[in-house]
Image (spheres, rainbow, N blue to C red):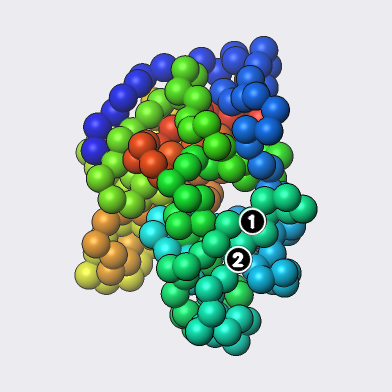
Amino acid sequence: MRILSKTLPILLAFACATPWHNEPVGSEVNLAFTLDRNLVTFTTMKIDGRTGRFILASAAPRTAIDPSFANPRRHHLLHFGHKETLALPNATPLPLGGVADALIGADAWNGRAISIDYHSGLVSFQKLGIAADAMKLYRYPAEPMIEVDVDGRTMNAIVDTTSPDTLVLPSPRKARGSARVRIAGNDFGNVDIQYANVSHARVGNRLLSHFLVTIDYGQRIVGLWRDPRNPV
C-alpha cells in the first residue's frame, strides 16, 4: 500500500462542506444510517424488498446474509431507495447470530466508491468515483487499508466498519492496552486499543468517525479527510 496524497486542508470543511460537494446531481445515492452499538447500520436499505438490520462491512469482499432472513438458494436484490437496485449474485449465506440480518460487503457497490459521513449519518454511493483534491489517499492491494502510526511505528491497518472499537492489533492473547495513535497526520494521543488474534491491524469506527472516509473499490483507494465537526 502507498500514500498518494498528503494534503488535508481542514478549513475546507467550512468553505465547501465536504470534498465531494460538487458532484453532479444524480451521480450519487445517499443512504441514511445510525451508529447502533457503534456499527454503521443502514435505516433505509432493503434486501429483496424487506427491511432488516443491515451493517456496513467495508472490508468484506462479499455481502453475507443470514439464512434465517432470506432464502440462500436465490439471487438477492439490494434496494437503495425507490429507483436504485443492484443484484447480489455472489452474496453468501452466513449465520450472523442475531448481530445482523446482513453484512453489506464490497460487492454491493459494483466496483464503485462509497463515502462515509459519520457526522451526518450518510453513506454516499458515488458513481463517479473518489474526489481526491482534499483528501489523504492510500492505495491498497486487497482489503481497504490505511497507514496508522502506533507508538512511532507505521503499519497498515484494514478499514473495518464492522469493528466498533478504536484499533485492533495482532497478538496471540486477547487483551487491552494503550498506545499513541496518529492517522493521516492527526495525533489522537494515547488511545485505548485492543489486542487480538488477527492477521492484520484493523481500525474501527471509534477512530474512523473522526474522518470523512471514502473507499473506491474499483480503483482500490481509501481517502481520509479530517472532519472538524467530530472533535478528537
Horizontally, is 195 left or right of 111 in the view? Answer: left
Q: Is residue 3 among what the camera can see?
A: yes
In the image, 136 versus 114, the foreground residue is: 114
In the picture as drawn, the residue positioned furthest to the right comes out as: 82
Q: Position of residue 215 (x, y in %)?
A: 45, 41
Q: Few, some or many C-alpha atoms within 10 Å of disc 2 (few <14, some 14-19, many ≥20)?
A: some
Q: Few, some or many C-alpha atoms within 10 Å of disc 1 (few <14, some 14-19, many ≥20)?
A: some
Q: Which mark is residue 173?
A: none
In the image, 220 versus 121, the foreground residue is: 220
Q: Where is residue 142 in the image (x, y as percent from the top left)?
A: 28, 50
Instruction: Name the quadrant of the C terminus.
Output: top right
For residue 225, above or below residue 39: above
- Precedes in sequence: disc 2 or disc 1: 2
Horizontally, is 59 left or right of 28 in the view? Answer: left
What residue is shown at x 60% (from left), y 66% (from top)? 77
Q: Is residue 150 among what the camera can see?
A: no
Which amino acid is tagged 1? Thr
Q: Which mark is residue 85?
A: 1
What residue is shown at x 66% (from left), y 30% (from top)? 229
Q: Where is residue 165 in the image (x, y as percent from the top left)?
A: 49, 57
Q: Position of residue 202 (x, y in %)?
A: 36, 54
Can you identify the residue that label 2 sits on? 77
Asked if the residues shown at circle 2 and circle 1 are in contact, with their CB atoms under 8 angstroms apart, the answer is yes
